[in-house]
Image (tube, rainbow, N blue to C red):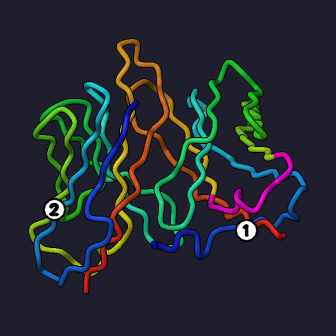
């Protein structure tokens, strides 16, 4: 069965420090991968998605970046964190289908980031 | 854990009653819809999905209804239980391998 792992579960970082959040998926090949952010009291905001190694689409311009160095690894980074980067970061995967038909997203348990 | 849904619409239901959570979507080209359940401090969990060639789909204790004419989606939960308390999101997508668009969410509170 497929599993998705995110770490760390919680993180407290000072303003201006770098960030690296990692997400890995097991049990599937060539998944679509996603990073979402959820602020308290808000819905899910799509940050980045990737349909293959080295292919990253950015939905929201900001001081975050994403990379996909391996098929089942997705990394969210920042060189200098802002207070507004605080939130709940969720990684998700979905199956890639040749026909383009959609499949559900499966989420990890998230990383709660607090920038102080 | 992370506190989500502090300012979201709230639906309060007595334990054992049926719950109906509604969602309006905006893109008439959307052809795939999903309901997710999110408990505090956790990622959203898939509940049920429906494609645009259907107007109703049933799962275990849950039913999703799709009305494409008015662009409305609903989730019905039968015999609501305390464990159903969570924030529920609808999501839509209009073409293959493109990201889902999520609604704002509704908090379901079950009164024992």
Magenta segment: B78-87
The image shows residue B97 at horizontal and vertical percentages of 38, 27
Chain for mark 2?
A: A
Is disc 2 placed on a helix, strand or loop?
A: strand
- In the displayed structure, does residue A43 sit left or right of residue B88? left
Q: Which residue is drawn at 19% across and 42% down?
A: A73
The image shows residue A18 at horizontal and vertical percentages of 11, 71
Compared to A82, does A95 lie above or below?
A: above
Compared to A48, does A8 lie above or below?
A: below
Q: Residue at x 76, y 33 (%)?
A: B67
Q: Mark 1 points at which residue?
A: B10
Q: Which residue is drawn at 47% across and 28% down?
A: A103
The image shows residue B44 at horizontal and vertical percentages of 51, 52
Residue B30: in magenta span: no
- In the displayed structure, does residue A97 sit left or right of residue B24? left
Residue B81: in magenta span: yes
């Amino acid at each position: 069965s497929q599993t998705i792992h995110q770490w760390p579960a919680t993180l407290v970082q000072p303003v201006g420090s770098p960030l690296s959040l990692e997400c890995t998926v097991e049990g599937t090949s060539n998944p679509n991968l996603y990073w979402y952010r959820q602020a308290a009291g808000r819905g899910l905001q799509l940050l980045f998605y990737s349909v293959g190694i080295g292919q990253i689409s950015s939905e929201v311009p900001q001081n975050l970046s994403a990379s996909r160095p391996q098929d089942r690894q997705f990394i969210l980074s920042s060189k200098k964190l802002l207070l507004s980067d605080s939130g709940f970061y969720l990684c998700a995967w979905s199956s890639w289908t040749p026909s383009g038909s959609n499949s559900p997203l499966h989420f990890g348990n998230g990383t709660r980031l607090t920038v102080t | 854990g992370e506190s989500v849904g502090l300012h979201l619409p709230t639906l309060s239901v007595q334990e054992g009653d049926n719950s109906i959570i509604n969602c309006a979507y905006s893109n008439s080209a959307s052809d795939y819809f999903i309901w997710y359940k999110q408990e505090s401090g956790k990622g959203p969990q898939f509940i049920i999905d429906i494609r645009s060639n259907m107007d109703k789909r049933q799962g275990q204790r849950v039913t999703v209804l799709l009305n494409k004419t008015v662009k409305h989606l609903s989730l019905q939960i039968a015999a609501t239980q305390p464990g159903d308390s969570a924030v529920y999101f609808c999501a839509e997508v209009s073409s293959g391998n493109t990201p889902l668009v999520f609604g704002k969410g509704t908090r379901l509170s079950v009164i024992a």
